[in-house]
């Protein structure tokens, strides 16, 4: 009997490992999702809970409504989106598409490569030693580029909030001396813009003055 139980336990463990290694989709309504180091998974979806990927994880689409997304080092994903929460990534992140947050920040450490867009509505964007293949845009958040490059445009969209006329509400845009914006900087509202000497940027258009 003990031998049969041991065989059954080994079979269950092996099955669970095979399912995970095969790229299983995981979806939850309540509770977070935690993926251990080195795993390969499919789509991850949570309504009320955060999603955390340890180092060296490969996943497909990551989506949550009420929760943050935490990504370790050397993570590879197709895309990540959250409504009420932030997206924070470690080193050497690779994203085939883009990153998007509504009410939360997006922060990517050195070695990040996002092939499409990075967007927020009410959240800051901070890129350190990273490359974005598309646009970087926000409505109400700050944007900070540290030794990073944007192949597309940098866009600050119109503020639809109550305090759009207040100086305190102006987003702060900082592009350091080692950063580049290949496209155009489109400003649809007033901002505090700092472009350090040595930074390479395209045209700056103040649309709110038109």
Image: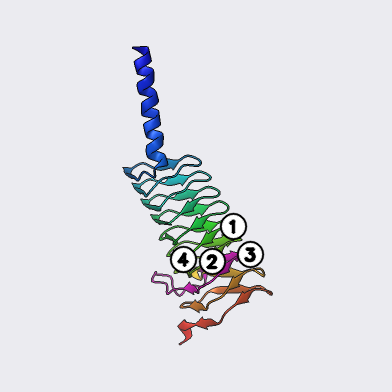
Query: Where 168 falls versus 37 (above or below)?
Result: below
Q: Secondary structure at mark 3?
A: loop
Q: Between marks 1 and 4, how big is the CA–CA gap?
A: 15 Å
**Viewport quadrant of the C terminus:** bottom left
Q: Between marks 1 and 3, how big is the CA–CA gap?
A: 10 Å
Residue 111 magenta: no
Residue on which disc 1 sits:
111
Query: Where 156 falls versus 69 (above or below)?
Result: below
How many residues crowd around disc 3 within 10 Å: few (fewer than 14), some, or many (20 or more)?
some
Q: Which residues are magenta?
A: 144-168
Residue on which disc 2 sits:
143
Residue 180 percent across, percent down from the top left:
60, 72
Q: Secondary structure at mark 1?
A: loop
Q: Secondary structure at mark 2?
A: strand
Residue 176 percent across, percent down from the top left:
64, 68
Residue on which disc 4 sits:
116
Residue 160 magenta: yes
Residue on which disc 3 sits:
147
């Amino acid at each position: 009997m003990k031998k049969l139980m041991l065989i059954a336990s080994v079979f269950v463990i092996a099955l669970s490992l095979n399912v995970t290694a095969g790229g299983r989709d995981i979806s939850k309504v309540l509770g977070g999702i935690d993926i251990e180091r080195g795993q390969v998974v499919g789509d991850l979806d949570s309504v009320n809970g955060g999603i955390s990927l340890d180092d060296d994880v490969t996943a497909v689409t990551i989506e949550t409504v009420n929760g943050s997304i935490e990504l370790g080092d050397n993570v590879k994903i197709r895309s990540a989106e959250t409504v009420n929460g932030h997206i924070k990534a470690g080193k050497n992140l690779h994203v085939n598409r883009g990153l998007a947050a509504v009410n939360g920040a997006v922060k990517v450490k050195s070695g990040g490569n996002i092939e499409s867009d990075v967007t927020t509505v009410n959240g800051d964007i901070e890129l350190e030693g990273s490359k974005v293949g598309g646009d970087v845009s926000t409505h109400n958040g700050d944007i900070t580029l540290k030794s990073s490059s944007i192949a597309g445009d940098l866009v600050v969209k119109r503020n639809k909030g109550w305090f759009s006329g207040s100086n305190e509400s102006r987003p702060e845009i900082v592009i350091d001396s080692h950063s580049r914006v290949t496209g155009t900087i489109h400003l649809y509202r007033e901002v505090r813009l700092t472009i350090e000497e040595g930074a390479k940027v395209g045209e700056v258009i103040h649309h709110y003055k038109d």
